Image (cartoon, rainbow, N blue to C red):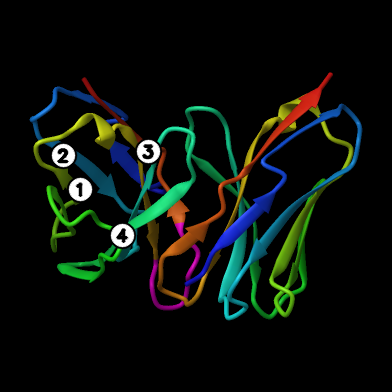
Amino acid sequence: KQEVTQIPAALSVPEGENLVLNCSFTDSAIYNLQWFRQDPGKGLTSLLLIQSSQREQTSGRLNASLDKSSGRSTLYIAASQPGDSATYLCAVSSSSASKIIFGSGTRLSIRP
Amino acid sequence: NADVMQNPRHLVRRRGQEARLRCSPMKGHSHVYWYRQLPEEGLKFMVYLQKENIIDESGMPKERFSAEFPKEGPSILRIQQVVRGDSAAYFCASSPGTGGSEQYFGPGTRLTVT
């Protein structure tokens, strides 16, 4: 049974810092891994999707890496801004048409 | 419509009433997924449907919950005789199925049971 864990559960850093959010999963047989952002009381915004054959994806100040063999992914946020404050969710799927398994998220707060 | 639509966005029901949540997938998408997010918890898979078929309902509670995705119209998640523990945000996602696996999420329906 696939389980997704995110550490830390909460993180507070001053504006401008670079930071790393961690995600681990127990079954390395994944189809893809996705990072989402969720603002309080809002829906999900997809940030990056990494196919199982890929090692990383980049979008602006965000970079996500994937190491399938070790069951790990990281989301790197460069030059953090107060607007980056949100909950970040890591999620994996095991096939092209299957449910997504979510981690519990990292609640990120960027202090001005 | 380019986006996944869910309505209503907010729904208040008294204990014992029925709740119906609707999801219209993105145009051209034939696969729908429902997820539930309980307060202060992560999202949990409930059910996966294709047109007129339930593919995976392993996350659905055994009683009071049902889902459908008819040939025409939106997907419906139905909760009968709601209880306070059903208060949560319910998210729908859609994907094109063959040729594309990424799921696109709707804004969610926030159900409050009083």
**Dot 4 corresponds to which residue?**
B59
**Callouts 4 and 1 close, C-beta under 8 Å:** no
Q: Secondary structure at mark 1?
A: strand
Question: In this picture, is A106 found above or below A75?
Answer: above
Q: Residue at x 15, y 42 (%)?
A: B79
Sequence-earlier tag: 4 or 1: 4
Q: CA distance from mark 4 to mark 1?
A: 13 Å
Q: Nearer the viewer, residue B81 or A19?
A: B81
**How many neighbours does mark 1 have within 10 angstroms: few (below 14), some (14-19), or many (20 or more)?**
many
Q: Nearer the viewer, residue A87 or A3?
A: A3
Q: CA distance from mark 2 to mark 1?
A: 6 Å
**Dot 3 corresponds to which residue?**
B108
Whether residue A50 sits left or right of residue B18 in the image: it is right
Q: Secondary structure at mark 4?
A: loop
Q: Amino acid at mark 1?
A: Leu
Q: Residue at x 67, y 63 (%)?
A: A24
Q: Chain of mark 3?
A: B
Q: Secondary structure at mark 3?
A: loop
**Dot 1 corresponds to which residue?**
B77
Q: Which residues are magenta?
A: B96-103
Q: CA distance from mark 1 to mark 3?
A: 12 Å
